[in-house]
Amino acid sequence: MKVKELFQIMVEREASDMYLRTKAYPRARINGQVEVVGTEALSKEEMSAVTNFLLEKEQLRRQFLKEMDIDFIHVEEGVGRFRVNIFMQRGSPAIVARHVHSHSKTFEELNLPAELFQKFCEESKGMFICSGPAGNGKSTTIATMIEHINTTKSKHIITVEDPIEFLFTDKKSIINQRELGLDVPSYLSALKHVTQQSPDIVYIGNIRDEETMRAAITATELGTFVMTTFHTVNAVQAIIRIVNFFPPYLHDEIRMQLSIILKGTISLRLLPRKDGKGRVPAFETMVVTPTIARLIREGRIREIQNYIDEGAMFGMQSFKKSLVSLVKRDLVNENAAREYADSKDDFNLELKGIKRTSE
């Protein structure tokens, strides 16, 4: 099968990811499940041809030969844009391609709480975190926030991505998108002079280390609204991850800074819809109220979950409540929701309307 045919299958079947490997049938993730989509296993020669085609640019080829792992955007004319990762396994290349949708959707189309997100988009400084496992809608959610700001506010927005996924057209705002390896060598380099570029909003694709986190915190303290993503499953783990970027003797200082700059988080998990038509998000939302800020400051981070559970009046919602809501709205099968729950026992109690009275 030609590369274009494989990408067309992805688009036609609304697959999020494609998996290619020598001596394996082409597979795609459709509605969250990995399915075989090819009729024959790929030979070593076919995989080599696909790899060479995708790495036709000399810069990409050199980078892959040097690092044996590469992430980039491939545009297939007439089909779409795809985020491609090529890596080595057992001495031969393997490929994972993700379909990147050209246009962002609305909060309502994503089944996300529009009113809460619009509130976060009104922020002029501080930090917002979108967390969740890979492939669960973090980039899509951030893109929707950026597009909402773009259509409603006159701002300067800078994105730093690896690689650039969604492409934006200036509307009320002006948006500059920087790609690692193409426009800037690292997140840290991009953030080093970002305040001199006079942004109102900065989106950092992913924060992986202390230096980048420190630069992001500094940007918020200088009056910029920073949005970023974390590969953590919930708000509590995201906060713990940030604190643990730093050595223990700085933890009190970092918690104090976080209690001031953090505005909120959303954590996402995509579940297969009951009707088989795609996936729908379960989400945990946390709004940093004075009480939650105090818990962060005092290092009582694990207690935050209790306040998320009871924080509906502030726009907060726990995963278990979100999962139960999806089941009661007949969007998700009960057994599927139970599998995605942090605690099956807590989910069962919530589904029955029983409140846990003690921990």
Image (cartoon, rainbow, N blue to C red):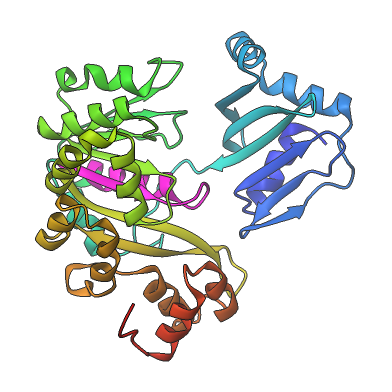
Tell me if 349 is positioned left or right of 63 in this view.
Answer: left
Q: Is residue 151 above or below residue 276?
A: above
Residue 63 occupies quadrant: top right
Q: Is residue 8 above or below residue 167?
A: below
Q: In the image shown, does 314 or 272 lie closer to the viewer?
A: 314
Q: Is residue 32 above or below residue 134?
A: below
Q: Position of residue 299 (x, y in %)?
A: 21, 52
Q: Residue at x 17, y 68 (%)?
A: 314
Q: Is 149 inside the magenta-drawn segment? A: yes
Q: Is 193 inside the magenta-drawn segment? A: no
The residue most toward the front is 249
Name the image quarter holding the N terminus.
top right
Tell me if 177 is positioned left or right of 133 in this view.
Answer: left
Q: Position of residue 81 (x, y in %)?
A: 55, 35
What is the span of residues highlighted in magenta in the rendered image?
A: 126-150
Q: Residue at x 15, y 53 (%)?
A: 298
Q: Residue at x 14, y 55 (%)?
A: 293
Q: Is any atom of residue 172 visible in this view? A: no
Q: Position of residue 112 (x, y in %)?
A: 35, 62
Q: Position of residue 34 (x, y in %)?
A: 70, 54
**How many circles with numbers are drawn on the protein?**
0
Name the image quarter holding the C terminus.
bottom left
Q: In the image shown, does 323 or 177 lie closer to the viewer?
A: 323
Q: Is any atom of residue 355 visible in this view? A: yes
Q: In the image shown, does 334 or 110 lie closer to the viewer?
A: 334
